[in-house]
Image: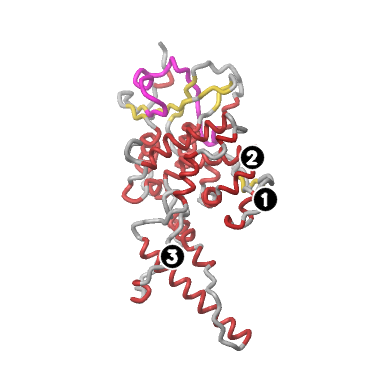
Amino acid sequence: RRQTHIRSSNQCLYLELSSQNEQPSVPLHTSISLFLLSYCECTSEVFLVSAKPDTQSSPPWKSQVPKSLAVSMVHVKDLPVLVRGCRLPAVLDETGRYCRAGLAVVLRHIIDRTCDADPRRKDAASLLGFKKTCLKACAEVSQWTRLCELSIPSAVEAHLRQPTNPSLHLPSALLNLQKTLGEPVKVHNDDKIRQQKLQQQKKNQKKISQDLQEDQGTDINQPQDSQSADGLELRAALAKLYVDSGAVPSTTNRERSDIRKVKTTELEHVFAEGLYFTLTDVVLLPCIHQYLSSLQSHNASTLSQLPLLLRWYLQVQEVPRAAQACGMALSTPKALTTPPNHSQSTTAQPSETGKP
């Protein structure tokens, strides 16, 4: 059998193309892989694997693929034997003798290959997280790998197949994610960030007191304005993402002992696993985007029960290049125009924040 598509000097990535209503469609595992490929600007040859021949000159699935990627279609019977025995997604190396399979394994390999080709890509390397262990463990032992590979994609796809089914509006996997986003963040340098947060709170309190004395000529004990301090987690996270630009000043001054010893309020989640954008967020974004878009169309009132998930969705859009690379028109739910704990009507349709 002729297999001209595999004779290449580059590695080949094979992604599943499913069928919905007799039309080929892009499943979530494939959308996730395409998102990361676009984010990392990877040069692998990409093939969408279908069980049916593609007879359309402009197939519908093309609208779901980032325009920056060159993607071809291949029939399942034309797959290399090694790939045919694996569950997609799968990567076949240049020799055609070594195949990697499984979503987390393939995604980590894409990042490793990107960093090998260009060591300056610190934004790609940081996706693997502290000690480069993000989604490294298998789904049987890691709750995050299990959530990203199995629970969330399965729950979202079940909802998308029956978007009007009330029992699928709030899947347990999404509620577990919402609960996790509300738990305190534990990171290797949390003491440093806590100290910064306490310093910011003290500066805010001092400034308010001075302003009141100037304006009123009296010394009034004013409740602390913690708006700036509350956003410190987000600023710390975004500062790490922009570190290559040199816009983040370095600080070498040692804090006073009273600051070092005092524990402030718990650090809040900015992204899925804590303060920093990782591979976990890359996996979740295509899933959560399609889930929230469906909810807004079929049962918008449910959004009020997912305030932390909505906040995460907005904060991911602040990541450089992420919104453009995902190939999706990310939107802003109306529920986020007010603080999550003061949500009002959520039935309004979203307004687009921009298209790639």
Q: Are marks 3 and 2 in contact (CB under 8 Å)?
A: no
Residue 306 pos. (x, y %) = 55, 48
Q: In which quarter of the image is the C terminus?
A: top right
Q: Residue furthest front?
A: 167
Q: Which of the marked residues, 2 or 1, is nearer the chain's N terminus?
A: 2
Residue 58's quadrant in the figure? top right
Q: Looking at the image, which is closer to me, 256 or 58? A: 256
Dot 3: within a 10 Å radius of its alpha carbon, few (fewer than 14), some, or many (20 or more) residues?
few
What amino acid is at disc 1? Ser
* Residue drawn 34% across the image and 21% down it: 82
Q: Mark 1 points at which residue?
A: 345
Residue 265: image location, x then y, percent: 43, 65
Q: How many labels does the image show?
A: 3
Residue 221 occupies quadrant: bottom right
Residue 197: x percent and y percent? 44, 67
Say whether disc 3 or disc 2 marks the residue closer to the N-terminus: 3
In this rendering, is residue 182 above or below 76?
Answer: below
Residue to which mark 2 is pinned: 299
213 w.r.t. 325: above or below:
below
Q: Which of 288 and 278 is in front in this view?
A: 288
Q: Residue at 64%, 45% (x, y): give it.
A: 301
Which circle's residue, 1 or 3, is located before the other in the chain? 3
Along the viewing direction, whichever of 87 and 81 lies nearer the viewer: 87
The three-letter code of the residue at mark 2 reads Asn
Label 2 crowd (10 A; few <14 / some 14-19 / many >=20): some
- The local secondary structure at tag 1 comes to loop
Q: What residue type is labelled 3?
A: Thr
- Give the magenta part as a residue range: 65-91
* Residue at (68, 44) in percent of width and height: 349
Judged from this view, the residue extending furthest toward the bottom is 217
Q: Is mark 3 on a helix, strand or loop?
A: loop
Q: Name the residue under label 3.
A: 265
